[in-house]
Image: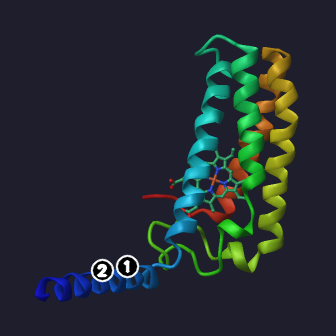
Amino acid sequence: MKFGFFAAGLAAALATAAIAQEAEDPFADAVESRHGLMLLMAQNLGTLGGMAKGETPYDAAVAGKAADNIAALSSVMSMDLFPAGSEYEKAADSFALPSIWSNQEDFVKKISALNDAANAMTADAKKDLASLQAGMNGIGGACAACHKAYRQPEE
Ligand code: HEC
């Protein structure tokens, strides 16, 4: 009987702790999700970049898959991953600058620009090495333009 009470009390305490933790950091999921998305895009861009620079041999199938992945991943990007307040120095691990929310229209435009460049690359990457190389600036430029404006550089 005593143990039963103890177990119930423990379960209740754990539930409270979980809720308290969530209340402390309501943005943890959004920050983690967008980091995962960004890292996956970087990984696939690295595959394309390696071929573009001649570090790895051009392979149309591998390049095409990487480009398709970037297009799919960039299509997931939206303000849903950037809830208001999930910014640098307010949400743990966030390097998202507050100007994202004060300049939201431009930020969303930069998401579209990446989607356009990534969609163009899906054809270029499968065609030949020269087309892949020609498309790299478009994607790389779209990533860089947004980071320059909206990401706090890591020290
Ligand atoms: C529309 C804006 C935008 C575009 C486009 C964009 N990013 Fe990001 N990226 C961000 C922001 C904002 C952060 C910081 C997010 C945070 O820390 O919460 C970030 C963070 C990152 C990170 C760091 C992730 C981490 O774990 O800290 C990587 C890597 C990254 N981006 C790669 C890319 C690549 C590769 C592309 C292009 C294929 C790209 N990003 C396109 C806005 C963008």
Mark 1 is surrounded, within 10 Å at the Cα level, by few (under 14), some (14 to 19) or many (20 or more) other residues, namely few
> Residue at point 80% right, 40% down?
118
The percent position of residue 88, horizontal first and vertical second, equals 52, 73
Q: Disc 1 beta carbon < 8 A from ligand 1?
A: no
Q: Which mark is residue 14?
A: 2
Model colouring: rainbow
> Residue at point 53% right, 67% down?
29
As rendered, which of 137 and 123 lies closer to the eye? 123
Asked whether the residues under the numbered discs 2 and 1 touch, taking CB atoms below 8 Å apart as contact, a structural biologist would say yes
Question: Is 107 placed above or below 20 here?
Answer: above
Local SS, label 1: helix
Specify the amino acid type for callout 1: Ala
> Residue at point 69% right, 20% down?
62
Image quadrant in which the C terminus is located: bottom left
Q: Which mark is residue 18?
A: 1
**Residue projecting furthest to the left:** 2
**Left or right of residue 135, residue 90 in this image:** left
Image quadrant in which the N terminus is located: bottom left
As rendered, which of 7 and 130 lies closer to the eye? 7
Q: Which mark is residue 65?
A: none
Local SS, label 2: helix
Specify the quadrant of the image occupied by residue 119.
top right
As rendered, which of 70 and 106 lies closer to the eye? 70
Specify the quadrant of the image occupied by residue 9.
bottom left
Specify the amino acid type for callout 2: Leu
Question: Is 48 placed above or below 93 here?
Answer: above
The percent position of residue 103, horizontal first and vertical second, equals 77, 75
**Residue projecting furthest to the top:** 57
The percent position of residue 6, horizontal first and vertical second, equals 17, 86
**Left or right of residue 21, residue 134 in this image:** right
